[in-house]
Image (tube, rainbow, N blue to C red):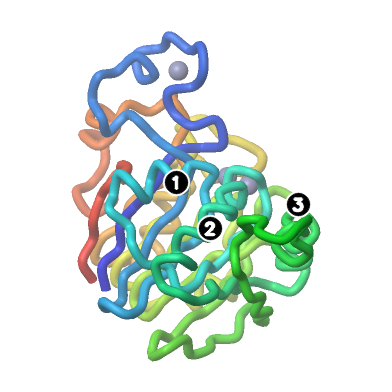
Amino acid sequence: MRVTVLGTGTSFGVPMIGCECPVCMSTDPRNVRTRSSVHVEVHVELAFLVDTSIDLRQQSLERGIRRVDAVFFTHTHSDHVNGLDELRSFNWLQGGPVILFSRRDILDDIAMRFDHCFHPPQEGAGVPFIQLQPVEEGKPFDFRGVEVTPLPVKHGILDILGWRFDRFAYITDASHIPEASMEMLQGVEVLIVNALRRAPHPTHMNLEQALSVVDRIGPRQAFFTHICHEMEHTETNATLPPTAQLAHDGLVIEI
Ligand SMILES: [Zn+2]
Ligand SMILES: [Zn+2]
Ligand SMILES: [Zn+2]
């Protein structure tokens, strides 16, 4: 399994428009954070995304992404879904639909917001060809040989999903991980989890909270994502253990 981290930014992205802080002004490409998503290649004929980042087009071009069979959605905040129309490039490359997996209410919200995909306004309208596949949270299922588990997590007052794929797990936008989901994360080899900044935040874990999640799960390697402009890449990583580091756009992890 090859995981490519497509984006590691919070909803504004880094640099933020108009901000002149040292991180936004940095010339280190690892301080450029597009909106959060990962691409997972299982083998040449099976690949998927978690979320369709608003920056999906740019990310796919930069990272040479050529295949997306499915998307596993965490929630419907704009930074995580607004790249959905770009899926039509993968319809065209693969000659078939892209399957969207999530909880029923999350898919209903996507179907409402992207109604044009189901009711094209006119003949020849270039809309993505997608199929919705509702799943039950906390219930593992098989997707073409990969064991997939939708993990309930809290995002402020919202109930959203993290995802486990065999020995890899990806959790973004969580402020709290319930005990039952912590149990379902046991045995994960590589964990990507969100860490917004050092200061606390009501709807996102900060670095300290994310580190304590990593400590409890004990993966071989952990990376942090959904990062704002307050944490400089190299400086922050120097304060962290080598097994729990800030991710950066374009990072590739072999599992
Ligand atoms: Zn987000
Ligand atoms: Zn800034
Ligand atoms: Zn969110």
- The mark nearer the N terminus, 2 or 1, is 2
Say few, some or many: other residues with alpha carbon within 10 Å of mark 2 (under 14 / 14 to 19 / 20 or more): many
Q: Nearer the viewer, residue 144 or 152?
A: 144
- Between marks 2 and 1, how big is the CA–CA gap? 13 Å
Residue 104 vs residue 251: left or right?
right
The quadrant in which the C terminus is found is bottom left
Looking at marks 3 and 2 on the same chain, the residue that comes earlier in the sequence is marked by 2
* x, y percent for residue 214: 38, 58
Q: How crowded is mark 1: few (under 14 residues within 10 Å), some or many (20 or more)?
A: some
Q: Return the residue nearer the eye: 219 or 173.
A: 173
Q: Distance between the residues labelled 3 and 1?
A: 31 Å
The residue that disc 1 covers is 57
- In this picture, is 57 found above or below 88? above
Q: How far apart are marks 3 and 2 (CA)?
A: 20 Å
Indicate which disc residue 19 carries: none
Looking at the image, is mark 3 or mark 2 nearer the viewer?
Answer: 2
Residue under label 3, please give it.
Answer: 157
Residue beneath disc 2: 51
Nearer the observer, 144 or 240: 144
Residue at (33, 62) in percent of width and height: 66
Can you say which quadrant of the picture contains the N terminus? bottom left
Residue at the image point whose x is 43% and y is 28% from the top = 14
Which tag is nearer the camera, tag 3 or tag 1? 1
